[in-house]
Every structure is written in structure tokens, then in C-alpha cells.
Amino acid sequence: MTRPPPAAPAAPPAAALWRGSDRVTAPLGPARAALGRLERLGRTTGPVLRRAGRAAFLLAPGAAEPVPELLRWLGWGPELRLPIEARAAHPGAPRVPEPRTAHWLRAGTRPPALDLRSPDLLCLLDALADACTRERLGLPPAR
């Protein structure tokens, strides 16, 4: 008797990973462009939520705090006023309320893996900043 292959683990509700995850948010258009670019490059992003016209890239705890400095180091300083925000999670009392209407843009089945040791975090930030700038200037997404 043959057994059916094991089912892939189902993605948890979007809110389940929101509470304990640091996050980087960006407008939905540039976020989708950055996701497409990162997929073509074979880079990982971890789980991504869509909520109220923005995308939230979930990060490992502790990864959000240095994001402004990392963006500056990559050449995307605060003078550019990019619509990218980093928020730290506070388990038990999050700064950002748990979303009731968040939906998966890219589902995740486990806690986020992008942290400060991951080179993919720098790729994500660079792709997001580039996509935001291209949208502002009316340029097509990068390939």
C-alpha cells in the first residue's frame, strides 16, 4: 500500500508571525518590484505581508534597529526621504498593532530568517530603496 506524500506545512495566519517579528515596510508597488528582482536573483526575503497599501518584510528580532544605518551605508541616506520604515517588535506589547486585515504577499511557514548576519538583508534593503526611487522618478522596475 502506498502512502500519499506528506502535505507541505500550511502557512500560519499572517498575524501569527507579525507580533514577534521586526519588519521593514514599503509601499506595495515598489515592494512587489523588489520582490520580483530578488526572485530573479535567487535571493531569499522571508515572509512578506500586505496590509493597507504597504508590504511588510518580516525580519528576525533585532534586525530592524540598524536598518537606517544600513540604508545610509548602501548610499540610500535619509536625505532621499524614501518611504521605507523599520519597526522593532516587542513581544507581548508590540509598537505596531497586530493586523486584522493583513494578507500574505509571500507566505512563511516559520519565523523570519533574515537577520544582521544575512547578506540577503542588504540585498533586500538595496532592492527596496532602488524600487522606491524608480517609482518616484517614473522609471520602470529594475531587472
Image (cartoon, rainbow, N blue to C red):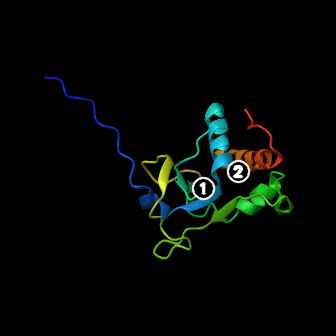
Look at the image and tell me in which quarter the C terminus lies: top right
**Residue nearer the viewer, 120 or 11:** 11
Residue toward you, 96 or 140: 140
**Mark 2 = which residue?**
125
Q: Residue at x 60, y 56 (%)?
A: 53
Q: Amino acid at mark 2?
A: Leu
The residue identified by callout 1 is 53
* Residue at 70% in and 58% down: 84
Q: Is residue 87 above or below residue 126?
A: below
Residue 100 higher or lower than 53, as above or below: below
State left or right for residue 103 relative to residue 41.
left
Residue 119 visible in image = no
- Toward the right, the furthest residue is 79
Type of amino acid at the residue the image marks with label 1: Gly
Dot 2: element: helix
- The location of residue 48, given as percent across then percent down, is 54, 50
Pair 1/2: label in front: 1
Q: In x, y percent, where is residue 68?
A: 75, 62
